[in-house]
């Protein structure tokens, strides 16, 4: 019984190996949906990067104890729906001049980043 | 869509019987749209059955309850409504009404109605501070009387003034969905919006229906790079390499920096034995892509494949295929 089983297992392993060897390498083709999702992600990352590059936003982040470059690097690891929220908030940043509105918008973004573990400032307060 | 996740159907206010007004003057009214009076709380299944029925899918609300009704919340989620429509072979398109103003929202409704399609909408008949979410189906539009005609709750022909309707609808960010048959196009959507909706529904569509829908969309938006890209991928999947090659070339002509097309075209060329052509495309893609691009991993995988093939394949093979 156990010999038969061993034999069968070896046979199965051999089959598996042969099949996987004879299959072509995984083709690196992008499905349309996959491509659109990745493009959207890139667009969101661009939005965040552009906002974080603004002098007034950078200053605001630093004032609140966040290193903008570090935060930006970590934003890139966010799952898509959270990244989309951050980008959505930053898209509505006031164009400039209105400091209070800017502080408000940056605060909301920081709150999202805090909740998603990108930064960790609020529990030090 | 962002914050409104759940729709609890109202049982009292929105479904209360109202005397049906005398029929309309000018405007559109889709009188053929079926009517399913809703059972307690279940406006989701009723409204969805109405919209599906109107697009040729005969299904009773009871058969949709398992799909869209969440007993604990006495309501249906928007994403479930959309997913259920997909399961029945329709392409749900969420209209671009969230960002539109009053006139734009009304125009969007009217455009779809004129095309013969009713709209599934989410309204809030809140009572004091309690939201009462309600799904209904817009079937008509009376410009003279400034009224919208709805299949709603237990009312087969509910009339709401533009003002009242827009107010209740605005609370869901004017969420409105049309259910398209394969090959139908939305009245107002962009190429991108339609393509996204089509791709999201494609898992439930027959390959022929999917390709036909793409072909129809390409007739309206021939210059959309992404639509050409999608058609190229579809042709490649169905083994039509010539059509795929043509579409990839068209995509790259419209948008030379289209990373998806550069990558997939390189892969196709590789399959055709055209290694140096493949190399050229994938090199272009990698030079264009930012190092942090989410596409980079795929591009590099393709590059490795091309490099591996370059060592083994004979260059003569590509010409033999007729490139």
Image (cartoon, rainbow, N blue to C red):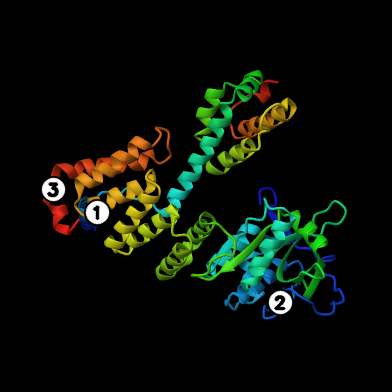
Q: Secondary structure at mark 1?
A: helix
Which residue is nearer to you in this view: A83 or A120? Answer: A83
Structural crowding at the residue carrying mark 2, measured as other residues with C-alpha within 10 Å and reported as few (<14), some (14–19) or many (≥20)? many
Give coordinates of residue A60: x percent, y percent: 65, 22
Q: In the image, is B176 to the left or to the right of A34?
A: right
For image coordinates 65% across by 66% down, the residue present is B111
Residue B284 numbered mark, or none: none
For image coordinates 73% across by 57% down, the residue present is B103
Residue labelled with disc 1: A16
Residue labelled with disc 3: B315
Q: In the image, is B23 to the left or to the right of B225?
A: right
Q: Are marks 2 and 3 in contact (CB under 8 Å)?
A: no
Instruction: Mark 2 or mark 3: name the one nearer the start of the chain.
Output: 2
Q: Chain of mark 2?
A: B
- The C terminus of chain B lies in quadrant: bottom left
Disc number lying in front (2 or 1): 2
Residue B36 numbered mark, or none: 2
Q: Chain of mark 3?
A: B
Which residue is nearer to you in this view: B197 or A4? Answer: B197
Res. B308 image quadrant = top left
Q: Secondary structure at mark 2?
A: loop
Q: Is residue B70 visible?
A: no
Structural crowding at the residue carrying mark 1, measured as other residues with C-alpha within 10 Å and reported as few (<14), some (14–19) or many (≥20)? few
């Amino acid at each position: 019984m156990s010999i038969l089983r061993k034999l069968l297992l070896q046979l199965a392993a051999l089959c598996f190996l042969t099949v996987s060897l004879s299959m072509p390498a995984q083709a690196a083709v992008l499905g349309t949906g996959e491509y659109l999702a990745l493009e959207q992600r890139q667009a969101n990352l661009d939005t965040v990067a552009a906002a974080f590059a603004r002098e007034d936003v950078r200053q605001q982040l630093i004032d609140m104890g966040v290193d903008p470059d570090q935060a930006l690097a970590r934003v890139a690891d966010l799952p898509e729906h959270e990244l989309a929220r951050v980008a959505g908030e930053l898209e509505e940043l006031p164009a400039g001049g209105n400091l209070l509105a800017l502080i408000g918008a940056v605060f909301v973004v920081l709150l999202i980043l805090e909740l998603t573990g990108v930064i960790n400032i609020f529990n030090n307060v | 869509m962002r914050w409104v996740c759940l729709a609890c159907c109202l049982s009292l206010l929105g479904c209360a019987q109202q005397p049906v007004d005398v029929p309309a003057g000018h405007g559109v009214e889709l009188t053929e749209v079926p009517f399913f009076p809703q059972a307690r709380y279940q406006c989701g299944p009723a409204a969805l059955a109405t919209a599906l029925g109107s697009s040729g899918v005969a299904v009773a609300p009871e058969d949709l309850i398992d799909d869209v009704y969440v007993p604990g919340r006495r309501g249906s989620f928007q994403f479930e409504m959309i997913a259920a429509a997909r399961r029945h072979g329709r392409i749900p398109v969420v209209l671009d009404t969230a960002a539109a103003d009053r006139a734009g929202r009304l125009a969007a409704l009217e455009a779809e109605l004129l095309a013969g399609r009713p709209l599934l909408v989410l309204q809030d008949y809140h009572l004091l501070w309690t939201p009462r979410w309600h799904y209904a189906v817009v079937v008509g539009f009376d410009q003279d009387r400034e009224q919208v005609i709805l299949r709603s709750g237990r009312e087969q022909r509910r009339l709401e003034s533009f003002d009242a309707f827009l107010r209740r609808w605005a609370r869901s960010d004017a969420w409105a969905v049309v259910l398209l048959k394969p090959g139908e196009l939305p009245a107002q959507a962009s190429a991108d919006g339609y393509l996204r909706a089509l791709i999201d529904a494609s898992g439930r569509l027959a390959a022929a229906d999917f390709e036909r829908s793409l072909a129809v969309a390409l007739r309206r938006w021939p210059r959309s790079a992404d639509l050409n890209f999608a058609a190229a991928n579809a042709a490649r999947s169905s083994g039509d390499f010539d059509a795929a090659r043509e579409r990839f070339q068209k995509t790259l002509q419209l948008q030379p920096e289209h990373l998806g097309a550069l990558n997939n075209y390189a892969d196709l060329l590789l399959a055709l034995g055209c290694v140096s052509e493949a190399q050229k495309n994938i090199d272009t893609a990698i030079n264009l892509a930012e190092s942090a691009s989410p596409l980079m991993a795929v591009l590099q995988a393709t590059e490795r494949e091309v490099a591996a093939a370059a060592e083994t394949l004979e260059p003569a093979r590509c010409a033999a295929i007729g490139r």
